[in-house]
Amino acid sequence: MAKLVILNQGMTGRTFDVNLDRTTVGRVEENTFQIADASVSSRHAEILLQGSDLLIRDLNSTNGTFINGEKISEAVLKPGQTLRFGQVELKIDDGQPIAASAPAPTSVSGSAPAPAPAPAPAKKTVDGTMVIPRGVSLNALEQSGARPASFDTNAAFSKKTNKTNKYFLIGGILVGLIIVGLIIFLIKQASGGSK
């Protein structure tokens, strides 16, 4: 039985047994194989079990489906190849020792100068970028005391706003009193002149 193993940091070692004729892969729960990652589309791809072959079909995903770094719309995944949904890398584990030697062919096709050590830095680079799409957890925000303090500048702004409002209000009242005084003066002048 074929098994897909996630290689990304934070999800390393997470596996999925491909034992259904049709397996859907995506970010939302209604998929057979859910990968909760921002780079994976809601309904990203499907895996069709055809005998001992795994046929991977992209479902018009935003970030694409790749086998050994090449974007595919439909292809057969063979042991030792790297499958990628968005930024999430997976390997097929069929119980054969081929999976252990799989990183060398991937690194040779991806970057020719480095033989065997090349996959580790490449994975670390991909793993490092995977932290960014996930964002900050609610717990991290609640525990962080510095962030709310930086947003606590409203008190300084409200004091300035209140002081400005006071001056504006006092100025408006003075102008209003002057206008009322002028109106009363003009009414007295008009009534005095008509007698």
Image: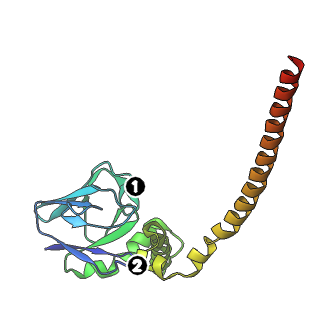
Q: Secondary structure at mark 2?
A: loop
Q: Which residue is mark 1?
A: 63
The quarter of the rendered structure image containing the C terminus is: top right
Q: Residue furthest front?
A: 195
Q: Amino acid at mark 2?
A: Gln
The percent position of residue 5, horizontal first and vertical second, equals: 27, 75
Relative to 114, residue 54 above or below: above
Q: What colouring style does the render use?
A: rainbow
Residue occupying the point 32% across, 67% down: 36
Q: Is residue 146 left or right of residue 67?
A: right
Label 1: few (<14), some (14–19) or many (≥20) C-alpha neighbours in 10 Å: some
Residue occupying the point 80% across, 43% down: 177
Quarter of the image for residue 188 reads: top right
Q: Which residue is mark 2?
A: 9
Looking at the image, which is closer to me, 36 or 24?
A: 36
Q: Is residue 91 left or right of residue 87?
A: left
Relative to 191, residue 135 above or below: below
Quarter of the image for residue 2 reads: bottom left
The percent position of residue 117, horizontal first and vertical second, equals: 48, 81
The percent position of residue 72, horizontal first and vertical second, equals: 33, 53
Relative to 38, residue 103 above or below: below
Q: Is residue 59 left or right of residue 51?
A: right
Give the CA separation, mark 2 to mark 1: 19 Å
Relative to 120, residue 40 above or below: above
